[in-house]
Image: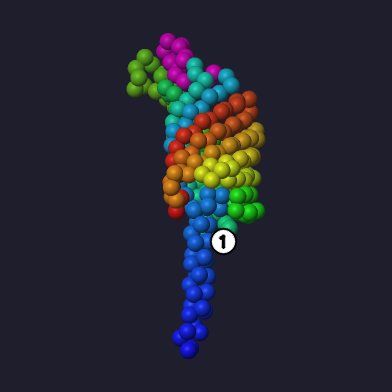
Amino acid sequence: MKKIALLPLAAILATTFSVQAESTDAASHNLTQNFNYISGGLQLNSYDHDLPSSVSVWNQNASLTDNTAGMYLRGSWNFTDNFFLETRGDATAKDDLTISHGLLGLGYFHPINSDLTIYGLAGYSRSEVELDVHVFGFSSATTTFRGDDSGLTGEIGARYQLMDKWTVEPAMRLADYDDTLYELRLGNNFKVSDHMSIEANLQHRAFDDLKEMSYQLGARYSF
């Protein structure tokens, strides 16, 4: 009799644990709330005016470009509760010109519902421009001119699951450089599996009198 009486209780407990396990697993695979990932891929930049990409002092020639190409990397770690650490970096080049940006920050995210999460991030960022100038007529005889800026940075953003396998990630960031850097981003994440997704991102930066548009295509591994 006791065994028969315990059967409904056992069934209820089994169902409860099963639902809890499914909920935990679902949360870990929800891209709007998963801040444990690494990502990277190709990046193309275009600029609102020409930049010197190759300069020779010997014959006073200079090549100009309004675009560069390279790669980006990004990583995030949700180390406790809703707090996460994030690092980003990108570097693009054309001929002897290299432009790079990097960031390290501490963030906090707040889920509004299963489809929408908002977050804020504060940290430190750095931007650098390098140009190898040919002093003589020989390719090995160069000197590097370098300009960089760095400062505190802050960002606010959101993640919204637009469709079952499509999450958009709008964000706005400011960096306290000598001239404030403004950055607007629109990330697009297309889920391929529980751990893999394809990224297709747009990014706009404005710094001093230079405006930059970036196009990123890569992959993200969530864990």
Looking at the rendered structure, the kind of residue marked 1 is: Asp
Q: Could you tell me residue 135's position as x and y percent? A: 41, 18
Measured from the top left, where is residue 55 in percent x and y? Answer: 45, 17
For the point 54% across and 45% down, the residue is 164
Residue ranking furthest to the bottom: 1
- The residue positioned 49% from the left and 33% from the top of the image is 216
**Towards the viewer: 1 or 165:** 1
How many residues crowd around disc 1 within 10 Å: few (fewer than 14), some, or many (20 or more)?
few
215 relative to 211 in the view: left or right = left
4 relative to 179 in the view: left or right: left
Residue 59: within the magenta? Answer: yes
> Is 2 in front, or is 86?
2
Which residues are the magenta region?
50-63
Q: Indicate yes or no whether the magenta region holds residue 151.
A: no
Left or right relative to 164: residue 40? left
Q: Residue at x 57, y 57 (%)?
A: 83
The residue at which mark 1 appears reads as: 81
SS of the residue under disc 1: loop
- Give the colour scheme shown: rainbow
